[in-house]
Image: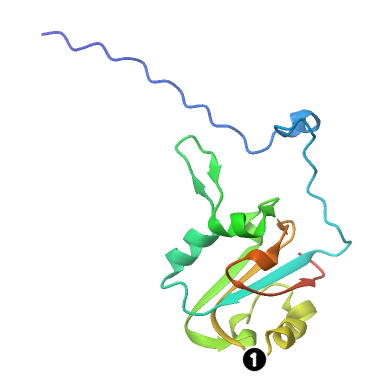
């Protein structure tokens, strides 16, 4: 008995996130050009967010922060992206911590990058609030409206380095 003929598998085309050669020709659906991701100030910014009791596990926090991907490799924005208007996504420039019990911001941010530049101001802005989760978003990530996040936005600070 002959084997049934198998159809050849189609190669899945993976779309690149950004094609540098065609950068100048990319346009939005309205016809205007995409704005490039440039910082508005000379110093990179870090945005600090906190919350308490919202995320039961590390996986739940990552599901809120990180984008999902379709089978075709297209990114699906995370709830955090949609709330804050995040652009120029660079996953290596996100830092987060999740503790078992609420703690002061200084304890949550122990060991975070470039903390000597902005940590004192962030702790002063937090006004002694206890939290079990902290998220720091460094440049080149840009947030259009960080105050709209469902997490508490402690503040945005200039940092040397990011």
Q: Is residue 123 above or below residue 34?
A: below
Q: Is residue 137 visible?
A: no
Q: Quadrant of the C terminus?
A: bottom right
Q: Is residue 8 above or below residue 62?
A: above
Residue beneath the point at 64% across and 78% down? 111
Question: Which image quarter: residue 161?
Answer: bottom right
Residue beneath the point at 58% across and 32% down? 15
Measuring from the top left, give residue 126's x and y in whole percent: 68, 85
Measuring from the top left, give residue 83's x and y in whole percent: 61, 59
Measuring from the top left, give residue 122's x and y in whole percent: 72, 81
Which is nearer the eye, 131 or 44?
131
Residue beneath the point at 51% across and 86% down? 102
Q: Is residue 98 left or right of residue 105?
A: left
Q: Quadrant of the N terminus?
A: top left
Q: Is residue 35 visible?
A: yes
| Residue that lies at the very extreme toward the bottom in this rendered image | 128
Residue beneath the point at 70% across and 33% down? 19
Which is nearer the eye, 152 or 8?
152
Secondary structure of the residue carrying numbered label 1: loop
Q: Is residue 96 left or right of residue 40?
A: left
Q: Is residue 136 above or below residue 72?
A: below
Name the image colouring. Answer: rainbow
Neighbours of disc 1 within 10 Å: few (<14), some (14-19), many (20+) = few
| Residue that lies at the very extreme toward the left in this rendered image | 1
| Residue that lies at the very extreme toward the top in this rendered image | 2
Question: Which image quarter: residue 160?
Answer: bottom right
Question: Which image quarter: residue 46?
Answer: bottom right
Q: How many marks?
A: 1
Which is nearer the eye, 74 or 126?
126
Measuring from the top left, give residue 26's x and y in whole percent: 75, 31
Task: From the image, tell me which residue sits under label 1.
Answer: 128
């Amino acid at each position: 008995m002959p084997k049934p003929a198998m159809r050849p598998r189609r190669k899945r085309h993976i779309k690149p996130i950004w094609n540098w050669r065609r950068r100048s020709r990319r346009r939005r659906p309205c016809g205007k050009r995409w704005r490039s991701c440039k910082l508005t100030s000379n110093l990179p910014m870090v945005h600090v967010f906190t919350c308490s009791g919202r995320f039961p596990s590390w996986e739940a926090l990552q599901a809120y922060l990180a984008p999902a991907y379709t089978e075709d490799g297209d990114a699906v924005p995370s709830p955090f992206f949609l709330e804050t208007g995040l652009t120029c996504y660079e996953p290596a420039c996100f830092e987060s911590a999740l503790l078992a019990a609420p703690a002061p911001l200084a304890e949550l941010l122990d060991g975070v990058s470039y903390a000597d530049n902005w940590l004192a101001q962030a702790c002063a802005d937090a006004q002694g609030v206890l939290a079990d989760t902290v998220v720091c978003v460094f440049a080149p990530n840009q947030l259009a409206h960080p105050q709209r996040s469902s997490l508490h936005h402690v503040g945005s600070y200039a940092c040397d380095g990011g």
